[in-house]
């Protein structure tokens, strides 16, 4: 399982620091690679410790993307 936390409010990704520092919000998905966590409990703890309700955090399972179980597209008009 490869999970990322993203703020629906800002689009930023919450990443645990690879250098031992505090988790931070980053805009670049390449930087967010360090924020991939492998279990739901760790992701939940990151949200609990570092997010405000205004952040509207969502958990994204990278292994779901591009599969038959992908997330539904919402808010798109044709």
Image: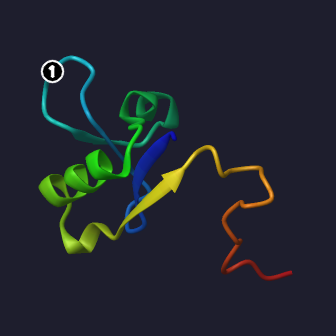
- Measuring 58% from the left and 45% from the top, which residue is drawn there? 62
Can you tell which quarter of the image residue 76 is in? bottom right
Taking depth in this image into account, of 49 and 69 the one nearest to the observer is 69
Q: Position of residue 33 (x, y in %)?
A: 46, 30
Label 1: how many Cα within 10 Å (few below 14, some 14–19, many 20+): few
**Depicted 76 relative to depicted 37: above or below:** below
Residue under the image location 63 percent in, 44 percent down: 63
Query: Residue, x 31% and y 49% (percent of image)?
Result: 43
The C terminus, quarter of image: bottom right
Does 29 sit left or right of 25 as displayed? right
Q: Residue at x 36, y 52 (%)?
A: 40
Determine which quarter of the picture holds residue 25. Answer: top left
In terms of image quadrants, where is residue 72?
bottom right
In the rendered image, residue 5, in percent from the top left (x then y), is placed at 39, 52
What secondary structure is found at the residue carrying circle 1? loop
Number of numbered callouts drawn:
1
Q: Which residue is mark 1?
A: 20
Farthest-out residue, top = 19
User: What color scheme is it?
Assistant: rainbow
Vertical placement of residue 4 versus 77, above or below? above
Taking the image as shown, residue 26 lies to the left or right of residue 50, namely right
User: 17 above or below 3?
Assistant: above
Determine whether 70 is above or below 28 in the image. below
């Amino acid at each position: 399982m490869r999970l990322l936390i993203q703020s629906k409010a800002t689009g930023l990704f919450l990443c645990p620091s690879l250098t031992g520092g505090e988790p931070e919000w980053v805009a670049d998905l390449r930087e967010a690679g360090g924020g991939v966590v492998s279990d739901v409990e760790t992701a939940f703890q990151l949200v609990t410790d570092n997010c405000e309700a205004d952040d509207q955090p969502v958990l994204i399972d990278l292994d779901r993307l591009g599969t038959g179980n992908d997330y539904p597209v919402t808010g798109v008009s044709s």
